[in-house]
Image (tube, helix red, strand yellow):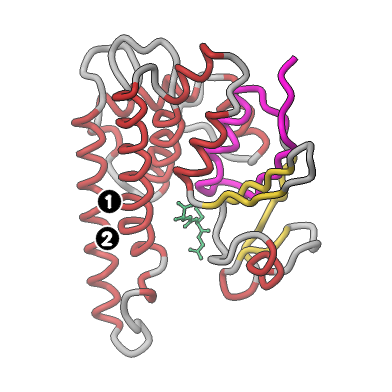
Amino acid sequence: MASFPQLTLYRANGSCAFIPHSVLRELGIPFTAVRMTMGAGGLWEAADGTLSHAEYRRTVNALGVIPSLKVEEADGAVAVITEMPAVLTYIASLAPTAGDAQHIAGKTAVARALAVSWLAFLSGQLHGRGYGALWRPRRYVDGARYPDAEKLVIAGSRVSIAECYALIEGRLPAADAGFALGTLETQPSLVDFNVYLFYRWGVENGFAMDTYPRYTRLARAMETRGSVKKAIEVEELDFKFPV
Ligand SMILES: N[C@@H](CCC(=O)N[C@@H](CS)C(=O)NCC(=O)O)C(=O)O
């Protein structure tokens, strides 16, 4: 029986923390979760009132964002892992069997590097640059003083998000099989869980996701997995491909 450190995932329903949430379930790694909600001013705090935003920043994540993963080792060592690529690659390193590790992180050095390349692109370009500007345009421009400039930031973010979706479509396997790391893959990797969440956001934010056939096939396949279904239920989300 594999033994794991004690893990605490700071997550919010429907947020990008869905990705580590579903990967932990996929690998059957035990964890507890602290559910966060947006409090005053759009800042994360614990839904049960046990952690204010200021306390979260002070003790867990200095940027005040989610996901964060607290790791408590048997010898008492404690670390908090932040930033999606680090959180996901750390979880992959806990895969209970060698076979699981190969599927989730990549079978070869090149596949593992390609997986990290995907994760960096998804976090930096699509999430940070794209959705960051769409949802928080005032990080880029003082919208109260320059409302037209704010509209331009939002319009520009939609263009860059759509460009990312087109890039994802182009990078996914063309054949009616496989996962993001290749047509021969029989199990999803970190990349597939990651792109699934962004597919959901695309649907929810009015992007024409049905114009990406490879991506749509992959998202549909991901949504049939027990781990993803369970994360959807726990987070009280809808199914994008209801049966
Ligand atoms: N660079 C961080 C970004 C995480 C992030 O932006 N998470 C969103 C939730 S999906 C968030 O906490 N947003 C609140 C904010 O930006 O203040 C990562 O990759 O983990």
Q: Which residues are magenta?
A: 1-30
SS state under label 2: helix
Q: What separation in Å lies between label 1 and label 2 (alpha carbons)?
A: 6 Å
Q: Is residue 226 magenta?
A: no
Q: Residues within 10 Å of mark 2 (few under 14, many from 20)?
A: many
What residue do we see at 66% from left, 50% from top?
79
What residue do we see at 29% from left, 86% from top?
146
Q: Is residue 194 above or below residue 96?
A: below
Q: Position of residue 94 (x, y in %)?
A: 60, 28
Disc on res. 59:
none
Where is residue 237, by image quadrant? top right
The residue pinned by badge 1 equals 161
The reply to whether the residue tagged 1 has its Cβ within 8 angstroms of ligand 1 is no
Disc on res. 157:
2
Q: Are marks 1 and 2 in contact (CB under 8 Å)?
A: yes
Where is residue 231, by image quadrant? top right
